[in-house]
Image (cartoon, helix red, strand yellow):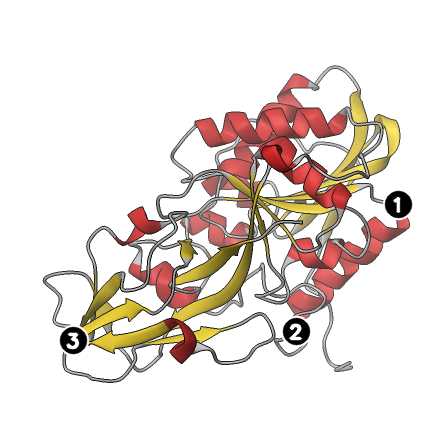
């Protein structure tokens, strides 16, 4: 460990701070100066851990927590709950992360990034929750493209899948990218990530709230297989990024790589070999890079160039495709998935 590093300040509280239930996500910084962990007592011990705002422009989790706490403002929660509020600074500006920050969902124990003050802070959060005997971890996210609501797990464990299917029959198993919160907590307890669609869709808040209320009342998590007709399970086999030196955009842009206009309509649709992702302009090199879950380059396994078009070489299902240029560059173009059965 770098002895010169100190964890980023983590605010801990044992009660809901004044104004939290009324503030907008953009004004949250006036109540919580930075990452914060709020512990609230409930009838059952072994707390539920809920994480919101790891990405500052993904507000659904925060709004769902506000709604949950308003419901229990004058009565005890069914179970103790610890709530982590992540990237408050990015939330102020309504962006995923600030330009000088690492992604807050890539810096948890297991990260491939060098140790930093923020990663020390995330380790502190995990250690604190281990001491509190955390029973279940829920990390709430949005996405920017057209995606259904779905849950993600990092272990093919019956308990994890039982919780995931309480949210959606559509479940994604992945082990890359590294350093995500759900994977860090998967070593302590059942852990799921909720993908609640676009942040402007209020149904995502209602769906997340219903799920949280159900989890608060769970006395135990079933440890038997989910019936096969109750789950559609997919395995993320590759993360796709656009190479750093390749400029890209959509039609009307004079970039090296022109993405198809309805790109995000391909999400969670099983696409055949030959499906076009975009056209090459001013280059004949593969504009994308594909890395599998072990970190191996598998670009040529999945992509090729036909004429001036980038096509997929084998049947595959993409997810997380978006038309947001900044998000594509900050995170990735998409993930590729294959259907699996247990």
* Residue under label 1: 133
Whether label 2 touches label 3, CB < 8 Å: no
Identify the residue shown where x is 64% and y is 79%: 114
Identify the residue at the far left of this view: 252
Q: Which mark is residue 104?
A: none
Q: Earlier in the sequence, mark 2 or mark 1?
A: 2
Q: Marks 2 and 3, how far apart in space?
A: 42 Å
Q: Which is nearer the N-term, disc 3 or disc 1?
A: 1
Q: Reply above or below: 144 against 337.
A: above
Quadrant of the frame with the N terminus: bottom right
How crowded is the residue under tag 3: few (<14 C-alpha within 10 Å), some, or many (20+)?
some
Neighbourhood count class around disc 2 (C-alpha, 10 Å): few under 14, some 14–19, many 20 upward: some
Ranked by sequence position, the earlier of labels 2 and 3 is 2
User: x and y percent of residue 189 in the render?
Assistant: 80, 48
Please rate how many residues cluster around mark 1, counting C-alpha atoms within 10 Å: few if below 14, some from 14 to 19, many from 20.
some
Residue 332 at x, y percent in the picture: 42, 65
Tag on residue 308? Answer: 3
Secondary element at tag 1: loop
Residue 116, disc: 2
Q: Residue at x 60, y 40 (%)?
A: 31
**What residue sits 80% from the left and 34% below the top?**
222
Instruction: Place residue 104 in its image quadrant.
Output: bottom right
Which residue is at 49% across, 40% downward? 59
How far apart marks 3 and 1 lie (CA) works out to 55 Å
């Amino acid at each position: 460990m770098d002895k010169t590093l100190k964890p980023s300040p983590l605010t801990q509280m044992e009660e809901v701070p004044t104004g939290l239930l009324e503030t907008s996500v953009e004004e949250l910084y006036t109540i919580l100066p930075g990452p914060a962990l709020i512990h609230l007592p409930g009838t059952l011990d072994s707390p539920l851990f809920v994480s919101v705002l790891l990405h500052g422009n993904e507000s659904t989790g925060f709004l769902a927590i506000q709604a949950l706490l308003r419901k229990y403002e004058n009565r005890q929660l069914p179970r103790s709950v610890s709530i982590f509020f992540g990237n408050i600074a990015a939330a102020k500006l309504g962006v995923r992360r600030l330009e000088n920050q690492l992604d807050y969902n890539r810096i948890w124990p297991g990260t491939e990034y060098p140790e930093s003050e923020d990663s020390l802070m995330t380790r502190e959060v995990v250690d604190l929750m281990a001491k509190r005997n955390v029973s279940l971890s829920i990390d709430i996210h949005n996405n920017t493209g057209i995606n259904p609501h779905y849950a993600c797990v990092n272990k093919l464990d019956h308990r994890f899948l039982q919780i995931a299917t309480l949210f959606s029959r559509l479940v994604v198993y992945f082990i890359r990218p590294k350093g995500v919160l759900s994977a860090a907590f998967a070593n302590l307890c059942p852990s799921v990530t909720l993908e609640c669609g676009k942040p402007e869709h209020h149904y995502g808040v209602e769906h997340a709230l219903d799920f949280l209320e159900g989890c608060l009342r769970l006395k135990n998590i079933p440890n038997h297989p989910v019936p096969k007709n109750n789950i559609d399970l997919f395995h993320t086999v590759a993360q796709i990024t656009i190479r750093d030196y390749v400029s890209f955009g959509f039609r009307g842009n004079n970039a090296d790589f022109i993405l198809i206009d309805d790109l995000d309509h391909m999400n969670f649709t099983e696409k055949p070999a030959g499906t076009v992702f975009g056209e090459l302009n001013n280059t004949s090199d593969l504009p994308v890079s594909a890395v599998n879950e072990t970190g191996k380059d598998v670009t040529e396994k999945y992509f090729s160039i036909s004429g001036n078009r980038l096509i997929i070489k084998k049947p595959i299902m993409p997810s997380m495709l978006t038309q947001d240029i900044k998000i594509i560059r900050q995170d990735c173009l998409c993930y590729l998935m294959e259907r699996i059965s247990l």
